[in-house]
Amino acid sequence: MSIILVVIIRSFISFFSLLLLVRLMGKQQMAELTFFDYVVGITIGSIAATLSVQVNQNTIATLTGMAIWTILPIFLAYLCLHSVWIRKVVEGEATVIIENGKFLENNLKRIRLTIDDVISQLRNQGVFNITDVEFALFEANGKLSIQKKAIKRPVTPGDLFLSPQYEGLPTNLIEDGIVLVDALRSLKLSKAWLHNHLEKANIPDVKQVSLAQLDTQGNLYVDLKGDQPFFTISTSNQN
């Protein structure tokens, strides 16, 4: 068998094996990427690359190695759910690095983080004055969590004793010219209802619509394909 054909076959095996194993590991690998997750991901990817191009390597043995490197993080994740101590050892924990506008130098040294690194991350979150910060914590995934001092936080409706109307999430009714029947059904609406409101905006064909969303206030947002304008159609007074 040609070596090129062998590489193609092994690449297919490697690709779909990696896809399956990553799916088994769950979304945490991307959502909360710790240093440990990073190392595990690189290792599994390296083994998959070896399986793809190192034709002298045993396929079953390499797949077994990938499986072991997948099963161990899943097993550790299960243990972390049931043990705080194991979770702290494997994933680490947040470290307070700013308290009441002051850097905690000992904590910075312990996690080997410089003040310049922290200031850069503060700027990325719109904080340019250290004295505005009540607490800053360096999370296990490398992100910085900030609590500003009360006087520096934006005013909220609760501060003004207001009760704003519930907004909720809009529902997509049309995507790329295709009516989402299940979405209409979940809102107890019909295609006729949708076409009726589109015609009021002189849109006779749903294929002209790039996106149509209905919010909880009954406003139908319609974005047309190309450089055409968008519309907001009020439907709250009609069924």
Image (cartoon, rainbow, N blue to C red):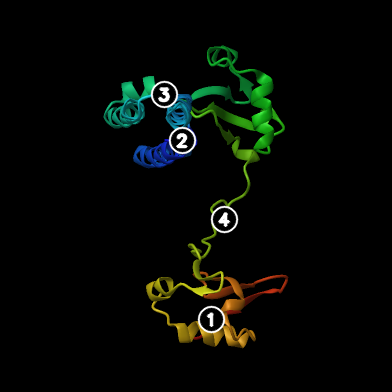
The answer to whether residue 215 of the structure is visible from this angle is yes
Q: Which image quarter: residue 104? A: top right
Identify which amino acid the numbered label 1 is placed on.
Thr
**How far is mark 4 from mark 3, CA to CA?**
66 Å
153 horizontally vs 54: left or right: right
Residue mark closest to the camera, 2 vs 3:
2
Q: Tell me which label, 4 or 2, sits earlier in the chain.
A: 2
- Disc 1 marks which residue? 235
77 horizontally vs 232: left or right: left
**How far is mark 2 from mark 3, CA to CA?**
13 Å
**How far is mark 4 from mark 1, CA to CA?**
27 Å
- Disc 2 marks which residue? 2
**How far is mark 1 from mark 2, CA to CA?**
65 Å
Residue drawn at x 63%, y 25% is 101
Residue drawn at x 64%, y 17% is 114
Q: Are marks 4 and 3 in contact (CB under 8 Å)?
A: no
**Residue 116: % across, % down:** 69, 21
Q: Quadrant of the N terminus?
A: top left
Q: Residues within 10 Å of mark 3 (few under 14, many from 20)?
A: few
Residue mark closest to the camera, 3 vs 1:
3
Q: Is residue 198 above or below residue 214?
A: below
Q: Tell me which label, 2 or 3, sits earlier in the chain.
A: 2
Residue mark closest to the camera, 4 vs 2:
2
Residue mark closest to the camera, 1 vs 2:
2
**Residue 108: % across, % down:** 58, 16
Identify which amino acid the numbered label 3 is placed on.
Asn
The answer to whether residue 239 of the structure is visible from this angle is no
- Disc 3 marks which residue? 56
Secondary structure at badge 4 equals loop
Q: Tell me which label, 3 or 1, sits earlier in the chain.
A: 3
Identify which amino acid the numbered label 2 is placed on.
Ser
